[in-house]
Amino acid sequence: MVQLAGGLNQMRAGICDAVVVARLLGAALMLPLLDNSSWWADGSTFSDVFDAGHFARTLAPWVRVVDRLPSALRGRAPLERTVPRGSTAEYYQTHVRRVMRRAQVVKLNHFDSRLHDHLPAALQKLRCRANYEALRFVLPVTRAVARLTHALTHPAALAASAAISTDHHAARAAGAAAADEAGGGGVGAAQGQGGQREQAERRDGAVKYVAIHLRYEPDMLAFTGCEYGGGAEERALLASIRQRWVNLPAMDAGKQRAKGRCIATPSQVALALQALGFPPSTRLYIASGALHGGPAALRPLLAAFPFTADKLSLARSLTPATAPAHTGGQADDDEDEGDGAWGGGGEVRGGAEGGGALAGVEGRATLLAAVDYEMSRRAAVLLANNNGNMAHLLAGHRRYAGVGSTVLVFGSSVHRLLDAIQQGDLAASHKLRHRLLKGDLNTQGESIDKAIAKGGFYAFPQDCLCRIQSSG
């Protein structure tokens, strides 16, 4: 048994590590317990978020996955342990296995980053099998993603009513509905693929979109120790949030910014997109939580890219009459008839069918985060203004799918260049374009080994890739 910790993406990595640990111990794995308290309080279970039956069947040749203890062990209290972070395979095979033999039922608590990044190739491949093949979101998530993708990628669908609404943006969006339908492709053009890319984008009348993983929540900003132009009121707010972390050291905001450790603002994200050559008609999908400053924080980005939406604005634009029926795709092709104790193909408990683009996931923080993950995974290009867990996992997932070079992540050098542009350094814009296109997640001119060391196995699953290139 494992008790996961953190948000959806930390838990996803923890689930994959738990599969490997069960293999190392020669033990059955109970469906991992999600963290319902330290991050989100929505009460979701594993089966609410992931298709448990598919998970168990996919891993059956390597690990037995169960949803309850066998009858001989029911009623037995598990022996609870917390293993050190980054524990090696040898640690589990010696210390934890010894405990396992004595207690028979062991529960590993706070299970995040509890397994070392470097393992034998066979175990790394099992990690990949768990992450990219066994973990599949439940049908309400895949159905919501299909509806939102249709709304975002079909030119007639993304009108002013689908764009994120702010007072500043309302007039601009209303007049932008007749903009060019090509949808972008700045990176493709920079790579000499403009014509072919546009033809691909227009296949079936759909255009492609860029996903922006935008970390700009108040707690994230507070953690950086930086200031973001909000004056004394903002400083007081962020200082009060910082008090939640007892061991967080005092930080000098000016030094943090000089080191490139501040989060890029929505305005700076717009500058980066423009430096990469994306036109105003580019479709943008914003994957984010509640932003510091509310929807108004997006005004600079919306002014530059009026066809910008998030899951909520897209869902509001899709009335029952205009929402497309879900056809094809994973949710239909792989739907199960039901699998005994696992339930009917992983459906969310109490999820409504139909009646809205977010039916079955609305009001469930973990499921809404899953929608953002899938929308970001399927985008033509992914740009992240941070170097966090979701950026790492998505980079690895996209590398596994063969589109790793379309992941653009802001490292410290990018943050410094963005600050220089806002201070009037015209040469910094060209440098920024070069830096972003030079390499994807953490590989900006670095060796692959160094990139792996910084980003971790989930960012660069090298043992699972058929071909590795230094450019990503």
Image (cartoon, grey):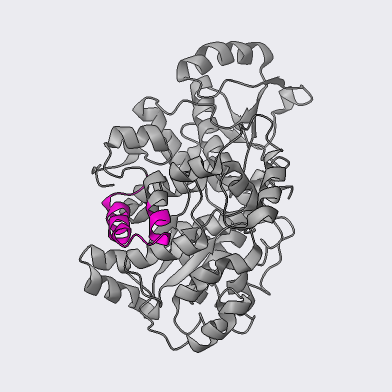
Q: In the rendering, at what x and y percent does residue 242 appear?
A: 67, 40
Up the image or down, 187 lies above or below 118; here it is below
Name the one closer to the observer, 346 or 170: 170
Looking at the image, residue 131 sits to the left or right of residue 181; the answer is right
Q: Is residue 211 visible from the viewing direction of this image?
A: no
Q: In the rendering, at what x and y percent does residue 57 appear?
A: 52, 42
Dominant SS in magenta: helix
Q: Which residues are magenta?
A: 417-441
Looking at the image, residue 163 sits to the left or right of residue 434; the answer is right
Name the one closer to the observer, 239 or 26: 239
Residue for point 52% across, 57% down: 214
Q: In the rendering, at what x and y percent does residue 333 appear?
A: 48, 62
Residue 24 counted in the magenta span = no
Residue for point 42% across, 68% down: 209
Q: In the rendering, at what x and y percent does residue 449 appear?
A: 30, 32
**Image quadrant in which the N terminus is located:** top right
Q: In which quadrant of the rendered view does residue 421 lie?
A: bottom left
Looking at the image, residue 176 sits to the left or right of residue 121; the answer is right
Name the one closer to the observer, 361 or 424: 424
Q: Is residue 230 visible from the viewing direction of this image?
A: yes
Up the image or down, 16 lies above or below 435; here it is above
